[in-house]
Image (tube, rainbow, N blue to C red):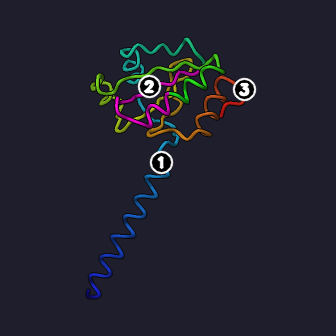
Amino acid sequence: MDRTGLVVLAAALLVTVAAGWWLRTRSGAVRATGEDAMAVTTVFERLGVRAGEADLTVVQFSTAFCGPCRATKARLTQLQATRPGLATVHVDAESHLDEVRELDVRRTPTLFYLDRTGAVVGRSSGAPRPAELVALVDAHVGAGTDGVS
C-alpha cells in the first residue's frame, strides 16, 4: 500500500470514529427544542394528548419491533407508578406518519416532554438515559417515594 492509501485510510478511520462519538453523545440525551409552539400543540391535540391534566406528559413515539422502545415504555410505567403528576402517551409511529413528519421524528423511541401548559420542555431521540429521565421527571413532578431510578 502506498503512502496516499495510508493517509486516506487514516482519514476515513478518523472521520468514522468522530461520527460514532458524536452520535453516541446525542443518543438518548434530553435537549431543549426550538419548535413552533402553536404548530406542535396542534399536532399533539390530533394525537389526543391532554397535557393540562398532568404536571408532565411524556409522549413516546415507538414502533412494534423496537427493543429500546419497550424498555423505555417499561421505565416510564415504573416512574408513573410512583409519580402521580406524570402522564405518558404512547404513539405508534407507523400509524401516525403525518405527525411523525410534522414533528421530525427520525428514530424510535423519540420522546417529547410537555409541561402542564402543553409547551415542549424537552425532547430525546433514542432510549433516554435513565438518570436524565428521572431528573427531568422529578424536576416537574417531584421525587418518587420508592427511590426508583
Estimate how packed mark 1 is, as few (under 14), some (14 to 19) or many (20 or more) residues with alpha carbons within 10 Å. few
Judge by depth and name the residue closer to the eye, 12 or 148: 148
Work out how far the residue at label 3 is from the one at label 1, CA to CA, in angstroms: 30 Å
The disc label shown at residue 102, or none: none
Residue at the spot 58% in from the left edge and 35% down from the top edge: 133
Dot 1 amino acid type: Arg
Work out how far the residue at label 2 is from the one at label 3, CA to CA, in angstroms: 35 Å
Q: Where residue 22 appears, x then y in whole percent?
A: 45, 56
Which sits earlier in the primary sequence, circle 3 or circle 1?
Answer: 1
**Going by the image, does 18 lie left or right of 117?**
left
Looking at the image, residue 21 lies above or below residue 59: below
Which sits earlier in the primary sequence, circle 2 or circle 3?
Answer: 2
Dot 3 amino acid type: Asp
**Segment tinted magenta in the rendering:** 56-73
Judge by depth and name the residue closer to the eye, 134 or 51: 134
Looking at the image, residue 62 lies above or below residue 44: below
The disc label shown at residue 146, or none: 3
Q: Which secondary structure lies at badge 1?
A: helix
Dot 2 amino acid type: Ala
Q: Which secondary structure lies at badge 2?
A: helix
Which sits earlier in the primary sequence, circle 2 or circle 1?
Answer: 1
Looking at the image, residue 43 lies above or below residue 104: above
**Magenta stretch holds residue 69:** yes
Q: Where residue 140 appears, x then y in whole percent?
A: 64, 25
Work out how far the residue at label 2 is from the one at label 1, CA to CA, in angstroms: 23 Å
Q: Which secondary structure lies at badge 3?
A: loop
Q: Quadrant of the N terminus?
A: bottom left
Query: Which residue is under mark 1?
Result: 26
Looking at the image, residue 37 lies above or below residue 51: below
**Going by the image, does 130 lie left or right of 3?**
right
